[in-house]
Image (spheres, rainbow, N blue to C red):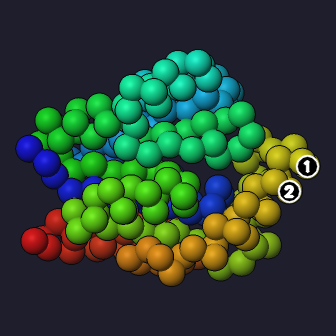
Amino acid sequence: MAGKAIIFCAPSGSGKTTLVKHLLQHNSDLGFSISASTRDKRGRTEQDGKDYHFLTPDEFKEKIVHNEFIEWEEVYEGNYYGTLKSEIERVWAEGKNVIFDVDVKGGLNLKKYFRDKALAIFVKVPSMEILEQRLQKRGTESDESLSRRLFKAKFEMSFQDEFDVVLVNEDLNKSLAEAQRLYDDFKKSP
């Protein structure tokens, strides 16, 4: 049985993952779509099959050939990300709506795929300066990767009007409440 899809997109560091994790903790009718990626695991905390389906480039390309993705792309040079059809089927088989935490291009592709069965939310920070501070606080970025992410973020911001809703993540508690309200309203819609 097909459910609905709620798509959270944002430039890296905007807080979309925090919002998605909150919704998953407070809504038993939501299931997370685990993206596939060829990038390396970050630190020791990321787990295959929980945070991402970590694939080799050859495995990823094999799945492309066999049409196993709803959408996929090369987000950064040599790093591919995608949404496996089997992930959506897994979540819907559990009788849940599916929630996505994806980049902007992936989100727009998912919105196009699911059409009126999807709510696409663009999460943004009040300014590029705040975004840079958040990325620096992570402690995972080199100067080069920080510069690359900020450049990409500026480009991604230009697509915010193509989403159903823009959620400005300035105050986390207000943003969490707004994300919950958006989901509650979306669940009730036909």
Mark 1, residues whose alpha carbon is within 10 Å: few (<14), some, or many (≥20)?
few
On screen, residue 99 versus residue 50, left or right, reads: left
Q: Can see residue 23?
A: no
Disc marking residue 66: none
Residue 167 drawn above or below residue 6: below
Name which residue type carries label 2: Ser
Q: Please give the name of the residue rendered at 44% of the width and 57% of the height, measured from the top-left corner.
A: 109
Asked if the residue at tag 2 contacts the one at tag 1, i.e. Cβ–Cβ closer than 8 Å, the answer is: yes
Mark 2 highlights which residue?
Answer: 147
Name which residue type carries label 1: Asp
Mark 2, residues whose alpha carbon is within 10 Å: few (<14), some, or many (≥20)?
few
- 136 or 189, which lies in front? 189
Label 2 residue SS:
helix
Mark 1 highlights which residue?
Answer: 143
Pinpoint residue 105: horizontal percent, then vertical percent.
54, 58
Name the outermost residue toward the right. Answer: 143
Pinpoint residue 143: horizontal percent, then vertical percent.
91, 49
- 25 or 106, which lies in front? 106
Name the outermost residue toward the front. Answer: 65
Q: Please give the name of the residue rendered at 51% of the width and 81% of the height, measured from the top-left corner.
A: 161
On screen, residue 173 versus residue 132, left or right, reads: left
Pinpoint residue 73: horizontal percent, then vertical percent.
57, 44
Q: For the C terminus, give its image quadrant.
A: bottom left
Label 1 residue SS:
helix
Pinpoint residue 99: horizontal percent, then vertical percent.
33, 51
On screen, residue 150 versus residue 34, left or right, reads: right
Q: Please give the name of the residue rendered at 65% of the width and 57% of the height, measured from the top-left corner.
A: 13
Q: Please give the name of the residue rendered at 54% of the width and 76% of the height, measured from the top-left corner.
A: 160
